[in-house]
């Protein structure tokens, strides 16, 4: 898909389809006024006839309008200004794509001015529009015998004022990079567990290394992890024939001496629950239990495309959780890389077991910050539903930066507490810590567990279990949390440049 910014007079643009907006109560947007004037009141006459009122969700395709060169004009209802927040913005873009995808149109010009979102930031609007368009184009077909029929739509042009060109072009470039990262995350998440194994994730990381000069990759196999004492991570994969992997992806965009920011992704490529077996209903969705790892992989590609001037390390703790005669059992006590011992009360609380060793491992990088991303708890869905990720952190500034990044990137989070009062729920009679804290505050006690292994650096935890995939007819990975992670790193890189200026 090609995206382009143009500044031409839209009444004289040669395009297969020109998209213009109509606000609530039939108020013509600026571009609609231009077209109406060139067409000697044609658009207003259509409105006067009652064919469209500007209500959000309305569309009207017009052809052969006198006085303009566009072959078609698509009138789009934008609705009330105050209601045009990000979800409405995305829905308008999605509806435009729905109108065009089955047509013979291969090029479209979007002239919605700055009216598609009540936030008039052109850069941000352009990014969100590009990401939404790219999301609409995505269709999974990797394991289907019949491949998806590609849309004929090949080029999308955005008409903006000359003064906004630089910001709009930057929005397209960054939006495309983020969208590409989201596609990587979605594709990995959607692959079935018999394809996307820990070894497959390693192969994908090595291909990422081949694609970008500023990325290098190290893979630790089970023998290397055992030598390091990573028995917690290894315990999760004990019951599986698939080898566990620790994947380290290094992006070098800063100076060699610059301390890195680290992302750690949970990569449980299929989670049966182990001996604490999950119910059969919807267990197929446990292929999505590696979406934290997928978001790290997608983010690393995106920042490489954007060439952010900073150093970032992505670490993926990959394992498959299966029941067998070798599987870890409830009541087993394991020793983590940190030396702390864990009583495994429930083998279905395995994400924290793979993450804790990875969080200890990253101490060697002397990180500025560490953010882990995981589909960690069903409890986060009870708390926040399928709209919002949870953020928990041992550092208020880092938590605030992630929340701010999520707001800007339209990938929102909500902070939950990480108070010492919750830690006692993890007490064990037989080890230093239990891997579950009982039926209450599940998301918080899971993060409390991880916090025991993050005392040497500033750390935040993103629980994305509610947002990483969609259910029902639209079942599939969403690509979250690539937008928030990219925005957080972009903000951090910008702050670093300002500090060095």
Image (tube, rainbow, N blue to C red):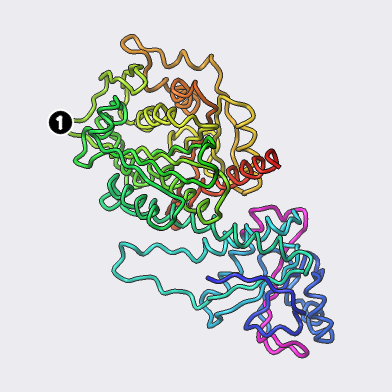
- Residue shown at the point (58%, 43%) measured from the top left: 489
| Rendered location of residue 445, percent (x, y) | 47, 23
**Residue 349 versus residue 493 in the image, above or below:** above
Front-lying residue, 444 or 195: 195
**Residue 307 versus residue 99 in the image, above or below:** above
Front-lying residue, 417 or 77: 417
| Rendered location of residue 321, percent (x, y) | 28, 37
Q: Which residues are magenta?
A: 63-90
**Residue 233 versus residue 193 in the image, above or below:** above
Q: Is residue 21 left or right of residue 466?
A: right
Specify whether residue 320 is in view: yes
Q: Is residue 391 magenta?
A: no
Q: Residue furthest left?
A: 325
Q: Residue furthest top?
A: 429
SS class of the residue under badge 1?
loop
Q: State the image quarter where residue 413 is shown.
A: top right
Q: Residues within 10 Å of mark 1 (few under 14, many from 20)?
A: few
Q: Quadrant of the C terminus?
A: top right
Front-lying residue, 300 or 335: 300
Residue under circle 1?
A: 325
Q: Residue furthest front?
A: 256
Q: Is residue 23 left or right of residue 198?
A: right
């Amino acid at each position: 898909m090609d995206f382009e910014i143009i500044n031409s007079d839209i009444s004289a643009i040669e395009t297969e389809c020109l998209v213009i907006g109509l606000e609530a109560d039939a108020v013509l947007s600026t571009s609609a006024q231009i077209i109406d004037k060139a067409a000697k009141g044609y658009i207003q006459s259509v409105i006067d006839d009652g064919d469209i009122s500007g209500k959000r969700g309305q569309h009207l395709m017009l052809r052969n309008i006198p006085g303009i060169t566009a072959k078609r004009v698509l009138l789009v209802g934008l609705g009330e200004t105050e209601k045009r927040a990000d979800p409405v913005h995305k829905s308008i873009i999605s509806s435009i794509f729905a109108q065009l995808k089955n047509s013979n149109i291969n090029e479209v010009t979007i002239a919605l001015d700055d009216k598609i979102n009540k936030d008039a930031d052109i850069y941000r609007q352009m990014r969100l529009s590009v990401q939404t368009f790219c999301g609409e184009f995505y269709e999974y077909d990797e394991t289907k015998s019949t491949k998806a029929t590609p849309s004929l739509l090949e080029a999308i042009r955005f008409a903006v004022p000359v003064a906004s060109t630089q910001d709009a072009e930057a929005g397209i470039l960054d939006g495309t990079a983020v969208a590409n990262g989201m596609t990587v995350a979605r594709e990995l998440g959607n692959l079935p567990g018999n394809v996307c194994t820990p070894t497959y994730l390693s192969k994908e990381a090595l291909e990422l290394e081949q694609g970008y000069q500023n990325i290098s990759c190290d893979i630790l196999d089970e023998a290397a992890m055992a030598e390091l004492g990573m028995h917690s991570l290894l315990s999760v994969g004990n019951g599986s024939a698939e080898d566990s992997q620790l994947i380290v992806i290094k992006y070098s965009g800063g100076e060699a001496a610059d301390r890195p920011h680290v992302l750690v992704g949970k990569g449980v490529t299929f989670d049966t629950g182990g001996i604490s077996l999950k119910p059969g209903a919807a267990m197929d969705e446990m292929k999505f239990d590696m979406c934290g790892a997928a978001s790290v992989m997608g983010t690393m590609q995106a920042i490489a495309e954007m060439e952010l001037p900073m150093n970032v390390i992505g670490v993926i703790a990959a394992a498959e959780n299966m029941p067998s005669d070798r599987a870890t059992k409830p009541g087993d006590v394991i020793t983590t890389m940190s030396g702390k011992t864990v009583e495994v009360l429930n083998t279905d609380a395995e994400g924290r077991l793979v993450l804790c060793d990875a969080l200890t491992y990253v101490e060697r990088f002397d990180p500025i910050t560490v953010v882990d991303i995981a589909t960690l708890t069903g409890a986060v869905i009870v708390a926040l539903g399928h709209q919002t990720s949870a953020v928990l952190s041992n550092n208020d500034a880092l938590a605030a930066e992630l929340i701010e990044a999520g707001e800007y990137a339209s990938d929102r989070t909500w902070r939950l507490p990480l108070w010492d009062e919750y830690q006692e729920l993890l007490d064990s009679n037989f080890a230093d810590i239990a891997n579950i804290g009982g039926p209450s505050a599940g998301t918080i006690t899971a993060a409390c567990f991880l916090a025991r292994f993050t005392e040497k650096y500033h750390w935040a935890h993103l629980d994305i279990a509610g947002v990483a995939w969609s259910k029902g007819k639209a079942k599939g990975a969403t690509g979250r949390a690539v937008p928030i992670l990219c925005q957080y790193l972009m903000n951090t890189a910008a702050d670093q440049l300002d500090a060095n200026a």
